[in-house]
Image (tube, rainbow, N blue to C red):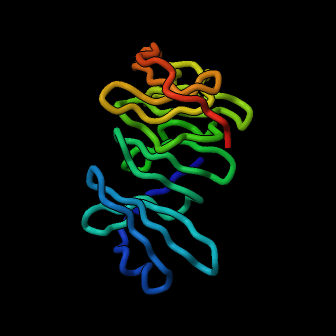
Amino acid sequence: MNIKLFKKRKKLAELSKKHIVFIDDFLHGVAWFKIVNEGKHSYGVINKKFEIIIEPIFEKLKQFNCGLAPFYNGVEWGFIGNKGHLKISPQFYDVGEGFSENLCPVKPTKAAHYGYINKKGIYKLPPIYQLAWNFHCGIAQVVINNEFFFINKRGKIVTESLHNYHGV
């Protein structure tokens, strides 16, 4: 996937004259924005000067965390850096809310379970969890065999079963 950066940074105001624009909260100096044109939406990234640093070419884009943001290309999720460079190629069915504490819960296919990758896209915890959430303070909530648990960054369960998961 070729991610183009504008050579001459356009001001977001130029685009907003022609399109409806939504801007997310700034985090680490950048924010994603959404443009709607003729019922179709696309996402890009701006800096705090409201200059476009990544063209609005993504079907979906989530917030930057740990220097990476999940993007959806219409088929799979991948990750870009805050300057627009491709960091992890699109290859995931789901990426949760993105990275937290340098790990991200990912689901490789619709039928698969979640595992956790590092910022290089390497699995640090294998895809064995029915559901998985982001790490906070060194622990994350997961579902294993229809039961909720908290795990540490090594995948060790650190709580008794919290309650049963009944699916969606």
Give me the residue at 30% from left, 53% from top: 27
Instruction: Report x, y in % for residue 76.
Output: 65, 44
Q: Kindly give the residue lying farthest to the bottom in the view shown.
A: 17
* Above or below: residue 37 compared with residue 113: below
Instruction: Report x, y in % for residue 29.
Output: 26, 54
Instruction: Report x, y in % for residue 4.
Output: 49, 56
11 to the left or right of 145: left
Instruction: Report x, y in % for residue 17.
Output: 43, 86
| Closer-to-camera residue (69/158) | 158
* Above or below: residue 35 compared with residue 155: below
Instruction: Please indicate, yes or no, whether residue 143 appears anywhere in the rendered image.
Output: yes
Give me the residue at 55% from left, 57% from top: 60
Instruction: Please indicate, yes or no, whether residue 121 appears anywhere in the rendered image.
Output: no
Give me the residue at 43% from left, 72% from top: 22
145 to the left or right of 116: right
* Above or below: residue 30 compared with residue 151: below
Q: Kindly give the residue lying farthest to the right in the view shown.
A: 111
Give me the residue at 46% from left, 15% from top: 157
Task: Tell how many labels.
Answer: 0
